[in-house]
Image: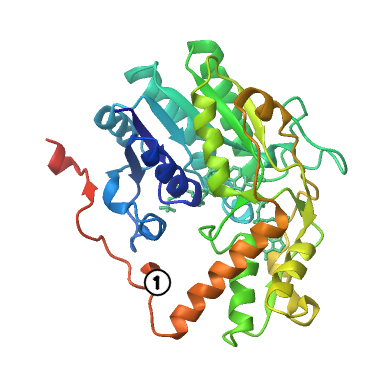
Amino acid sequence: MKKALITGITGQDGAYLAKFLLEKGYKIYGIYRRLSTPNFWRLQYLDIFEKINLIPADLIDSASLIEAIKISEPEEVYHLAAQSFVGASFEQAIGTGEITGLGVTRVLEAIRQINPKIRFYQASTSELYGNGKTQGSFNEKDLFQPASPYAAAKLYGYWITRIYREGYGIFACNGILFNHESPLRGLEFVTRKISNSVAKISLGIEKELRLGNLEAKRDWGYAPEYVESMWLMLQQKEPDDYVIATNETHNVKEFCEKAFNIVGLDYKKYIKIDKRFLRPFDVNYLKGDYSNAEEKLGWEPKTKFNRLVEVMVKEDLNRWKRWQNGERFPWDAPNYPGESKILTRALRV
Ligand code: NAP
Ligand code: G4F
């Protein structure tokens, strides 16, 4: 049985990837950090919490990462953990550099020291391109021009991955993934903020939606499909870097229009521009050319913009209707449920 270690398993992509790899027959280990309130709701939502092994570790703590690799003895490491919110990176630029940037080296160094045959996936991002284009699509050869502390940290992560590949022969790949969303997306990201608010407004729970830059364009895909590309990258003969995208772009306003349309409302009546959500520096246009991934990995996106908005709004509507009927979500009653295998040090010795 193949073993994989996922950093960021409690996040959107980590949860979907764990589910995908379990279905492929992998034994799954994930690192999680201690929080004052447990954050396993995505794993519970996908009904996989009981099927995975959890190891406490943190990207700022090298020793815990070394331990996680020693315990799990993985063939593949998917490094997804990061301070992943661009807006927050302007408020916490140093912390973002520490976690999102240097964290990559800490994981790679643990691999190099313990078993350099482990295959490594780095969660790189379309944010690397910054404001390099106003039309056309970005591919693997385009120039990186980061426009946030988050993107600068990810640029470091991208290069350190290539340096460990070329310098130490580690099978290390960068997935340059454009935005990908789902009903498991964090609530502060714009798509989920919109779908969640649309659901609440249509049910009379909320009255307005406060947003920042409505003109920003993004290439939005569907997260469950994107995690397959991570696995495909690590199954190739040679390591490489790949753009994963839909090659479509839409602005935030279009997302709002479509989402409000689904519940029969006019977005213009509910949106308020709020300066708090404007960034000091924003990326205005992103669209990705995934033809290299299509040719080499056989990967292509299936869920496009209209369907994505529909899936997200309908799922949030369903959740809030259930809530109105007295049901509570896992994140309203957080706990460490039942038969899970949390591998603390006490259990390991
Ligand atoms: P996410 O939902 O924000 O998940 C981030 C994960 O990182 C969470 O599990 C979080 O743990 C963990 N984490 C944060 N700081 C940590 C630390 N110091 N030590 C250990 N774990 C830590 O992000 P996502 O959307 O799944 O994205 C996954 C990765 O892909 C990220 O690296 C992101 O930057 C990158 N990416 C995402 C997209 C996208 O559109 N989603 C596109 C390109 C690249 P907690 O649950 O404890 O907070
Ligand atoms: O949803 P966002 O916060 O995502 P952003 O900044 O594109 O970053 C996401 O995708 C990256 C890939 O390109 C990942 F690397 C990263 O980890 C993350 O997953 O914002 C999208 C756009 C921005 O231009 C933002 O200014 O929406 C604009 N926006 C307008 N009003 C807003 C809001 N964004 C947020 N989060 N909240 C608003 O109220």
Q: Residue at x 74, y 80 (%)?
A: 265
Question: What is the residue that sits farthest to the right in this orientation?
Answer: 135
Whole-percent x, y for residue 130 in the image: 75, 41
Q: Is residue 221 at least partly visible in the picture?
A: yes
What is the image's colouring? rainbow
Image-based side of 120 in relation to 160, left or right: left
Q: Residue at x 65, y 45 (%)?
A: 302
**Depth order, front residue of 287/104:** 287
Question: What is the residue that sits farthest to the bottom in this orientation?
Answer: 204
Q: Is residue 14 above or below residue 313?
A: above
Q: Is residue 211 above or below residue 115?
A: below
Image-based side of 128 in relation to 111, left or right: right
The quadrant in which the N terminus is found is top left
Q: Is residue 192 at least partly visible in the picture?
A: no
Q: Quadrant of the rendered structure where residue 294 is?
A: top right
Amino acid type, mark 1: Phe
Q: Quadrant of the rendered structure where residue 40 is?
A: bottom left
**Depth order, front residue of 266/176:** 266
Image-based side of 174 in relation to 17, left or right: right
**Depth order, front residue of 110/17:** 17
Q: Secondary structure at mark 1?
A: loop
Other residues around mark 1 within 10 Å, as few (<14) / some (14–19) / many (≥20): some
Image-based side of 99 in relation to 298, left or right: left
In the picture of the structure, the residue carrying the numbered disc 1 is: 329
Whole-percent x, y for residue 304 in the image: 70, 51
**Depth order, front residue of 115/295:** 295
